[in-house]
Every structure is written in structure tokens, then in C-alpha cells.
Amino acid sequence: MLRIRVLGSAAGGGFPQWNCGCRVCREAWAGNPKAKPRSQSSIGVTADGERWLLLNASPDIKTQILASPALHPRGEGRHSPIAAVFLTNGDVDHVAGLLSLREGHRFDLFATRTVIDIIETNPIFGVLSAAAVTRRPIPLDRPVDIGIGLSATAFAVPGKVPLYLEGDEVAVGEESESVVGVEIGDGTSRFIFVPGCAVVTPALRSRIKDVPLLFFDGTTFTDDEMTAAGLGWKTAARMGHVAMTGANGSIPAFSGTPIGRRVFIHINNTNPVLIDDSPERAEVAAAGWDIACDGMEIVL
Ligand code: MLT
Ligand code: MN
Ligand code: ZN
């Protein structure tokens, strides 16, 4: 049995974002109960109810632990149920939380060689001593034993390098070890987690087909959502995220693919689906998709 807890459901910046007064954030700042605040995306999963794997380490990890009794330390002295962390890429919103896990607790850090190298070449992550935090580079497309009754199989998805490594020219949409999706299983149950994906390809559809539960990149509702709101110049595609709707949107792209349950995660603060009674939320729900919220639990 897999117990999954959504620790955070928003994209980088969270919801509302600290410096944002877009129409969606304004609802959250105003305390509208239909626009619940959300922290930056991360998921916890356990097979034995005792030891947990985190998928990504959000900058909000401390608040997420506080809000999740299953992740509190037990007994006296130092302890944490967090036994392992898996990184799907090197983005700030997925790795910054590692810095909060620096108090000598032993855990395993799983990621592709490319992402492990990003961590290794940035001296600030040296605060995670190698004696406590074992770096475990993983291959693509092969199940890896996480060691707590869970296996993880990473697969490349179209994406790009982290924003802070972009340089002058950036290739968006390439498949590499920079961005992965991951299938987590315990031998009986399984689910797939893809918080960032630039385009839904036929190969991705067949990789995901028949999975009982999918968490997928829900960054924006439309590709031009941020530019249309006057917030910068980037489309979702340029940021490495496929929009939910539109000709190439994820909702139409997965519409014919058999998937047990579909849940959007990593939702940007500009995305109107964050407002529970918005027409966009109704449209997404009618298409069979859930919107993750912090604290959501699923047992498989
Ligand atoms: C993203 O998902 O595109 C990144 O989190 C952006 C960022 O690093 O701010
Ligand atoms: Mn992100
Ligand atoms: Zn906003």
C-alpha cells in the first residue's frame, strides 16, 4: 500500500507569490476561502507508514513538515521519518529545501547524474555532509531500490536546464537527464509524478498509459497566461511547461490515454484553476482532472 501526501501543490513562488498582485493572487491575499494558499510543490510517499520518500525538496519544507504529523520527529533526541529525497530536476523550487535538511540527519538523495552534479558543484549544498546525505545517482528507465519498500524509475521528459543555468541560449523541449518524471512503486501499487514537462509526446503518453495515478505539470492554464497578465515576457512553453489547454495542451494531449486518476500539481499563482469556483476549474474538472492542494492524501 502506498500512502501519498501532497506537501505542496504550487509552482515556484507558491500561492500567493510574495510579490504578486495578479488577479488570482489577489483572491488569496484577500483571504477568499475559495483561493486557498499553497506552498511550493513536493510530495511525500511511504510504503510502511514509518519511513518517507520526498519527491523534491521545496523551499517551504519546514512549514510542510510542521503541517504533516507523519513527518514529525518521533521519540527523544534527533529523528526524522524522512529517509530519502528524490529530485526531478535542479530547479530552485525543487532543491532549495535540501538546505533545511542539513542538521546531520542521515538520508539518501536520489537524482540523475546531471542533477547530482548540479548539487555537487554548488558549494552551498556542501552543508549536506556526504557522511549523512548519500548522493545516489540513478540511471534512466531502470527501477532503483529506494530502500524503504519503494522503487523509483526515472524517465526523461522534455524540458530544459534550471533557470539559473540557462546562459544566453537555451534549448527547451529536449529530453535529457536534466528533467525527469518518476514512477514510484511498492511492488503492488504505483503512480507517476511529472511536475515539469515542456510538451506531451507520444512516447510520454505510452510511458504513462494505464498508470493508476498521475501527478502532472499544471503550471499554467493557457500558454500565454503570464504575458497576458503583463507579468514578464515568457510563455509557459519557454519556461519548460506545457499549458493545460490549447492545441498542444496537456488536457487534450492525454484525453485518449487511459489513466486511473489525473491530478495537476506545480500550479502557478497566475493559474485561475486555483480559484475553486472559477470557470477554468470547472473546465478542468469536467475533463476529469483534479487540482492538488496542500495536505491532500491518496492511498493506493
Ligand atoms: C520552473 O518550474 O519553471 C522553475 O521553478 C522556475 C524557477 O526556477 O523559478
Ligand atoms: Mn518550478
Ligand atoms: Zn500571482
Image (spheres, helix red, strand yellow):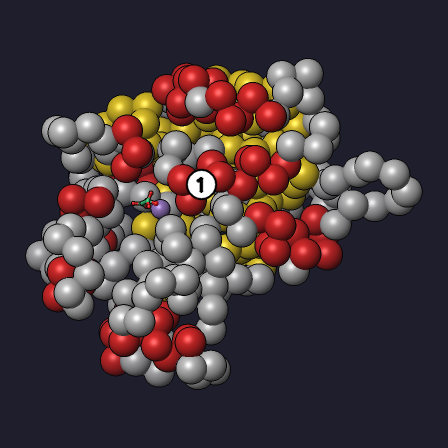
| Quadrant assignment, res 48 | top right
Question: Which residue is depicted at the point 44% across and 40% down?
Answer: 94
Q: Amino acid at mark 1?
A: His
Q: Is residue 37 left or right of residue 208?
A: right
Question: Which residue is depicted at the point 49% across and 39% down?
Answer: 96
Q: Quadrant of ligand 1?
A: top left
Say whether residue 185 is visible.
no
What SS does tag 1 mark? helix
Task: Residue 146 in the image: state x and y as whole percent.
Answer: 59, 27
Instruction: Give above or below for 168 relative to 248.
Output: above
Total marks shown come to 1
Instruction: Identify the residue position indicated by label 1 in the image.
Output: 94
Question: Which residue is depicted at the point 61% across and 25% down?
Answer: 128
Q: Nearer the viewer, residue 225 or 259?
A: 225
Instruction: Give above or below for 53 relative to 232.
Output: above
Say whether residue 41 is visible.
yes
Q: Residue furthest left?
A: 247
Task: Residue 84 in the image: state x and y as whole percent.
Answer: 61, 32
Question: Dot 1, how many residues are within 10 Å of its Cα: few (below 14), some (14-19), or many (20+)?
Answer: many
Task: Residue 271 in the image: state x and y as whole percent.
Answer: 28, 66
Instruction: Give above or below for 31 relative to 4.
Output: below
| Quadrant assignment, res 276 | bottom left
Task: Residue 72 in the image: state x and y as whole percent.
Answer: 74, 50
Q: Nearer the viewer, residue 67 or 209?
A: 67
Instruction: Give above or below for 96 relative to 246.
Output: above
Q: Is residue 9 left or right of residue 239?
A: right
Question: Which residue is depicted at the point 53% across and 26% down?
Answer: 125
| Quadrant assignment, res 105 | top right
User: From the Cβ of disc 1, is ligand 2 less than 8 Å away?
Assistant: yes
